[in-house]
């Protein structure tokens, strides 16, 4: 599903209304009907005797007047609270306000109602509709807007927001002051990117998207480069499996991971690559760690490369010929940051000209210029701390603009960026952004990132496409965690090793989609 910025949504509205001549009142009518359908999905309309619709002076308020009319026509008592003077309501919104008045619907200007009157209406209502601010809102609500939002939140009624909870920045997800805590939000035509980000997601509740009548050809004509990952997008990206095939068809993955105390990272990565469907997985390991892998990794091919337990530059001579035939390389989980290891990683990345996934200590051993000057095609998978070191930005800066931070770095350095977190963001050098929709807090445990790295590596060996592999790996990783919840796990007890056993179920869930 396409995800839009506020400016992109405004542009589509303009092209629809001014370019094609579709009246704004038509879009507003469709928006209001969509909100009513959302309310019906959340609670039976038969259960609602009275609804309070709180409207601002702009088009969001206009949508609210339409909602009020449709609820009124269904026999529900509706009180409309207008935050402003009637004379200040213009255009399409004014048309719908006038219709509401002609129907005899109670319209209460807040300057006459005051806080005490609003409290009475809220107390008597079964639900509240928030139609105060639209997607253009920035900053913090002040004055009567702040007071009204506080009152709405205090009364414990079901709250349905139109397009965006009032007080939330629909572009950034910022909440600088008071904001409506919605039980559900119906956004128009497309998801606005801020609604998928924190802290906004705390306020959005259930997120609905309604079709307001923007023609598909208008959308196709625009260069919209942001997507929310869902089953229908990811399913076609899974590597094809052939009835007449063998292990060589599905790629060879090399894993460079692990060090004393962190061999588990190498095991999780290697097994995840296999469960993603890779035909062969090799772990290139210092001799001192070989006994552990011989015990733990039955299906993985172990390649001892000398030394004791730490990767060293001299080992590259022993693996150069072996890695030449690989379809993908995974570097970093648990390898440590000792100076010999750092030199090993930098030298290997300088020489390797194929596909590579770089994670964890693989990232901690390099600088951004190492990526830019490389020959290969890289996927990097940092968490915000690792990304902070690479970008020079603080973690707070990164979290404030996850999409922008990932996109900027990807385009500048020519790498796929998988910025882990909530939500995980995938950015490509071509300017495409993918926002993940799967996963839960059960992933917040050591080793989960190693499983993700292995999944991406396994898909990469089969598809030979860094972007498709990153998308599939991230989505399946989160999907496995979600399915684990359905199978009796919980977000406290889920550990990284559990994910391995739900990868197959996650892939099955896509294959079973109609």
Image (cartoon, rainbow, N blue to C red):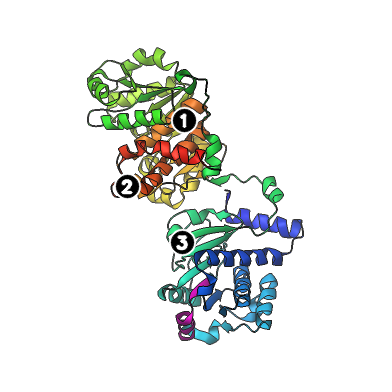
Check disc 2 and report its element: helix, strand or loop.
Answer: loop
Q: How crowded is mark 1: few (under 14 residues within 10 Å), some or many (20 or more)?
A: many
Q: Do the residues labelled 3 and 2 touch (CB within 8 Å)?
A: no
Q: Where is residue 298 in the image (x, y as percent from the top left)?
A: 30, 23
Of the pair 141 and 273, the residue shown nearer to us? 273
Residue 429 sits in quarter: top right
The numbered mark at residue 267 is: none
Above or below: residue 104 compared with residue 63: below
Magenta residues, start to end? 116-129
Q: Distance between the residues labelled 1 and 2?
A: 26 Å
The residue that disc 2 covers is 489
Q: Is-magenta flag for residue 121?
A: yes
Q: What element carries label 3?
A: loop
Residue 379 visible somewhere in the drawing: yes
Q: For mark 3, what is the residue?
A: 205
Q: Residue 459 carries which label?
A: 1
Placement of 299 over or under 168, stated as above or below: above
Which circle's residue, 3 or 1, is located before the other in the chain? 3
Residue at 46% x, 50% y is 401
């Amino acid at each position: 599903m396409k995800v839009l910025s506020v400016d992109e949504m405004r542009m589509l509205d303009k092209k629809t209304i001014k370019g094609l001549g579709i009246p704004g009142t038509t879009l507003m009518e469709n928006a209001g009907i969509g909100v009513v359908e959302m309310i019906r999905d959340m609670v039976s309309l038969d259960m609602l005797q009275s609804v309070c619709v709180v409207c601002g002076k702009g088009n969001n308020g206009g949508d609210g007047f339409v909602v009020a009319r449709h609820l009124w026509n269904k026999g529900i008592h509706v009180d409309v609270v207008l935050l402003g003077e009637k004379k200040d309501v213009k255009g399409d919104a004014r048309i719908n306000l006038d219709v509401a008045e002609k129907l005899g619907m109670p319209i209460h200007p807040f300057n006459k109602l005051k806080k005490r009157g609003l409290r009475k209406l809220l107390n008597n209502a079964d639900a509240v509709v928030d139609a105060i601010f639209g997607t253009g809102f920035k900053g913090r609500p002040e004055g009567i807007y702040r007071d009204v939002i506080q009152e709405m939140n205090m009364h414990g009624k079901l709250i349905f927001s139109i397009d965006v909870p009032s007080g939330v920045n629909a572009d950034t997800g910022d909440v600088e002051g008071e904001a409506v805590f919605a039980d559900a939000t119906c956004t128009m035509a497309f998801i606005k990117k801020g609604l998928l980000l924190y802290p906004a997601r705390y306020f959005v509740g259930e997120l609905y998207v309604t079709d307001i009548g923007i023609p598909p050809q208008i959308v196709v004509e625009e260069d919209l480069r942001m997507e929310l990952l869902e089953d229908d997008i990811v399913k076609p990206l899974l590597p094809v499996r052939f009835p007449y095939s063998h292990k060589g068809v599905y790629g060879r993955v090399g894993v460079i991971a692990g060090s004393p105390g962190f061999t588990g990272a190498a095991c999780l990565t290697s097994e995840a690559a296999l469960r993603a469907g890779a035909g062969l997985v090799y772990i290139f390991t210092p001799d001192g760690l070989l006994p552990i892998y011989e015990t733990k990794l039955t299906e993985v091919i172990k390649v001892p490369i000398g030394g004791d337990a730490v990767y060293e530059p001299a080992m590259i001579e022993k693996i150069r010929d072996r890695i030449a035939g690989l379809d993908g390389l995974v570097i970093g989980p648990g390898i440590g940051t000792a100076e010999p290891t750092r030199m090993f990683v930098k030298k290997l990345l300088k020489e390797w000209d194929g596909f590579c996934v770089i994670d964890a200590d693989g990232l901690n051993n390099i600088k951004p210029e190492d990526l830019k000057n490389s020959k290969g095609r890289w996927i990097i998978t940092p968490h915000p701390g690792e990304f902070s070191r690479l970008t020079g930005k603080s973690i707070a800066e990164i979290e404030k603009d996850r999409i922008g931070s990932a996109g900027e770095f990807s385009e500048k350095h020519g790498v796929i960026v998988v910025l882990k977190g909530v939500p995980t963001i995938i950015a490509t050098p071509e300017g495409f952004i993918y926002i993940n929709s799967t996963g839960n807090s059960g992933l917040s445990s050591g080793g989960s990132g190693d499983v993700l790295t292995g999944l991406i590596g396994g898909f990469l060996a089969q598809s030979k496409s860094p972007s498709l592999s990153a998308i599939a790996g991230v989505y399946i990783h989160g999907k496995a965690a979600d399915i684990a919840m359905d199978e009796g796990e919980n977000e406290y007890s889920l550990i990284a090793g559990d994910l391995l056993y739900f990868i197959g179920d996650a892939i099955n869930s896509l294959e079973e989609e109609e």
